[in-house]
Image (cartoon, helix red, strand yellow):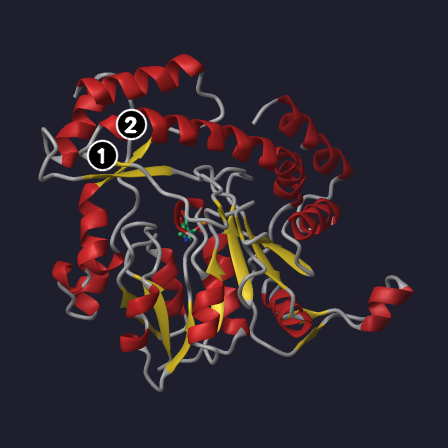
Amino acid sequence: MGQEEWEALRDPIFSGWVTQGPKVKEFEQLFAKRHSVEYALAVSNCTTALHLALLALGIEPGDEVIVPAFTWVSTANVVRYCFAKPVFVDIDLNTFNIDIEKIAEKVTAKTKAIIPVHLFGLCADIPAIKERFPNLKIIEDGACAAGSALNGVPAGGLGDIGCFSFHPRKSVTTGEGGMLTTNDKALGEVMDKLRNHGASISEEQRHHGPQPYILPAFEMVGYNYRMTDLQGAMGVVQLGKLDKFIDERDKWARFYQDELKEVKWLSTPKVPDGFKHGWQSFVTLVDENIAPYKRNAIMQILLDKGISTRPGTHAVHMLDVYAKMYSLKPEDYPNAEAANNFTIALPLHNRMSVEDYAYIVETIKSI
Ligand SMILES: Cc1ncc(COP(=O)(O)O)c(C=O)c1O
């Protein structure tokens, strides 16, 4: 963020239009174009996007929705918001995404949808999921995947509905913020109403201008999940930088991959053929069998040398709330457990310098 974002905030401040308005519309149109989808609808964050996606697909109490066991907690929480059951599936440690081979054993008569996550910016293999499970509705959790693609198809247009985040840990940010994408007009219309208290504006109002005596109709219980025009204005500027950011991150991801090859105890992320990684994070995996120290000790050494790292994310089935709710044990999803315990996200950011990257690889090699 810098001068351009700062200046972009002038428009909504001085026009006085600060909630969902023209800047949100502009951001949506640009986002839809960049991700090759018909409809993009901005919302307050990716968690609310996921919630609306489930509601639009008709998920009801008692339904089951498949989610990967290693993801940010909101992928599962949103299923609970609908009083449905999140059913966890283990991940593939090569991609950190849902293991497609393990989905079938979790599908029951109650399974209505699946939320594959494009974790850290690498798309889940949605075409393969579609082919194997044609009856399941697919919501892409693309929180980390703005600008990612699979076989040339951008994230957000691979499943029935896509959901994105503009939280500051993502490649482009609006502070908080989210986006829904779809190519289905009916789903787009429902989500448009749901984000705005369930209000539907009549065609007459839309086309013939303001008529002070007509209020919107309300046919459903909706939510206030709108984005502000301040965020929309910032989103327009940030989106314009997305491809440059990804290209830079891609360059440094390759640098890490090459330089860290000799560090046998640390595996770097692989990008399978046909996948364009969005590099929200560069997440490595420590092999504690051959590493000189445990994962946490390595992170502490790095911190002591001024290098800030984080675990990739958490295994949701190991969080107290879900472990208790469904009597889950860590070893029920061994790969998610391993990812929970052994991942390290290395620094990857557009404000880092050549010297920063060189210092990080040298420090890791010295360990
Ligand atoms: C995989 C995943 N899903 C959902 C979310 C939620 O996004 P938000 O913070 O915009 O609600 C995140 C955010 O970190 C995420 O990483």
Q: Nearer the viewer, residue 31 or 267?
A: 267
Q: Is residue 362 left or right of residue 16?
A: left
Quadrant in the rendering for residue 285: top left
Quadrant in the rendering for residue 243: top right
x 34%, y 63%: residue: 76
Q: Nearer the viewer, residue 133 or 280?
A: 133
Name the outermost residue toward the bottom. 109
Q: CA distance from mark 1 to mark 2?
A: 8 Å
Q: Is residue 267 visible?
A: yes
Q: Give the quarter of the figure containing the C terminus.
A: top left
x 12%, y 32%: residue: 291
Ligand 1 neighbours mark 2 (CB distance < 8 Å): no
Q: How many marks?
A: 2
Q: Is residue 212 visible?
A: no
The image shows residue 330 at horizontal and vertical percentages of 14, 58
x 67%, y 60%: residue: 39
Which residue position holds label 2? Answer: 260
Q: Is residue 144 left or right of residue 331?
A: right
The image shows residue 170 at horizontal and vertical percentages of 47, 40
Name the outermost residue toward the top. 355
Which residue position holds label 1? Answer: 266
The image shows residue 153 at horizontal and vertical percentages of 59, 55
Secondary structure under the numbered disc 2 in the rendered image:
helix
Secondary structure under the numbered disc 1 in the rendered image:
strand
Q: Amino acid at mark 2?
A: Leu
Q: Nearer the viewer, residue 148 or 65?
A: 148
Q: Is residue 340 above or below residue 135?
A: above
Q: Nearer the viewer, residue 211 or 233?
A: 233
Mark 1: few/some/many CA within 10 Å (<14, 14-19, 20+): many
